């Protein structure tokens, strides 16, 4: 009888270990079966922990040499579901216009965005993209009385992003966005350019 109890105890421990292994299975293991790795849950449908859904990245923007300009835009995104990504980002761009008006241009930005995979069964990795982008700038020059000019503007971007996966939670993103708030004035021109649309490449 004692040997039967031991056998039952061994079987129960073994089955518990197998069950735990299934619950904690890495979604990346689906690649071995020719399937895409899951982004927000295990293959058994259990939600992944918060930290396992975070995506970090960003991009370098506005790089040019005459006049010199460079910008950085780090991003933190959260894989809310298999098809929904939410994120926030900040940005800074420095431009040197000393040869033009004797000064520099500093741009600052903060944004929040949402991306939803529209029809994954037909066009996988194509996302509808909505974003609120608040920007401000300051210039130092020799043309104004106090040598400094400031301004700000807000963009509401709508459009599409194609996201090419590089691993389970990292991708190269190509975005085509249109600014619904664009106005033909100096602030918008300095902060968003002379057109109401933008093409952006980012990684997260």
Image: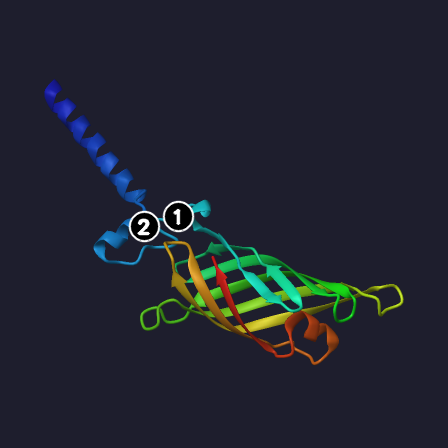
Left or right position of 86 against 47: right
Residue 151, how many percent across, how many down? 76, 67
Query: Outermost residue, bottom direction?
Result: 184
Residue 129, how many percent across, how many down? 50, 69
The reply to whether the C-beta atoms of the residues labelled 1 and 2 are less than 8 Å apart is yes
Residue 165 visible (yes or no): yes
Q: Which of 53 and 149 is in front in this view?
A: 149
Query: Outermost residue, top direction?
Result: 2
Query: Outermost residue, right direction?
Result: 145
Mark 1 crowdedness (10 Å alpha carbons): few <14, some 14-19, many ≥20: some
Picture quarter containing residue 154?
Answer: bottom right
Mark 2 crowdedness (10 Å alpha carbons): few <14, some 14-19, many ≥20: some
Tag 1 secondary structure? loop
Q: Nearer the viewer, residue 144 or 75?
A: 144
Residue 191, how many percent across, how many down? 67, 70
Residue 75, how many percent across, how many down? 54, 56
Q: Which residue is drawn at 29% across and 38% down?
A: 20
Q: Residue at x 57, y 72 (%)?
A: 157
Picture quarter containing residue 162?
Answer: bottom left
The circle on residue 35 is none
Compare marks 1 and 2 and give the one earlier in the sequence: 2
Residue 44 visible (yes or no): no
Residue behind mark 2: 27
Residue behind mark 1: 48
Q: Give the colouring mode of the picture.
A: rainbow
Left or right position of 13 against 186: left
């Amino acid at each position: 009888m004692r040997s039967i109890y031991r056998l039952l105890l061994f079987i129960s421990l073994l089955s518990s270990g197998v069950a735990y292994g299934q619950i904690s299975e890495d979604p990346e293991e689906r690649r071995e079966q020719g399937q895409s790795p899951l982004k927000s849950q295990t293959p058994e449908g259990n939600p992944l922990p918060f930290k396992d859904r975070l995506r970090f990245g960003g991009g370098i923007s506005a790089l040019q040499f005459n006049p010199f300009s460079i910008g950085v835009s780090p991003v933190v995104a959260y894989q809310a579901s298999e098809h929904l990504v939410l994120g926030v980002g900040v940005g800074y761009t420095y431009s040197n216009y000393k040869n033009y008006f004797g000064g520099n241009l500093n741009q600052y930005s903060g944004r929040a965005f949402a991306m939803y995979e529209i029809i994954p069964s037909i066009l996988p990795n194509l996302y509808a993209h909505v974003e609120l982008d608040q920007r401000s700038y300051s210039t130092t020059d020799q043309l104004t009385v106090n040598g400094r000019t400031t301004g700000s503007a807000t963009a509401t971007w709508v459009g599409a992003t194609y996201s090419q996966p590089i691993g389970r939670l990292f991708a190269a993103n190509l975005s085509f966005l249109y600014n619904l708030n664009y106005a033909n004035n100096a602030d918008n021109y300095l902060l968003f350019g002379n057109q109401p649309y933008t093409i952006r490449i980012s990684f997260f």
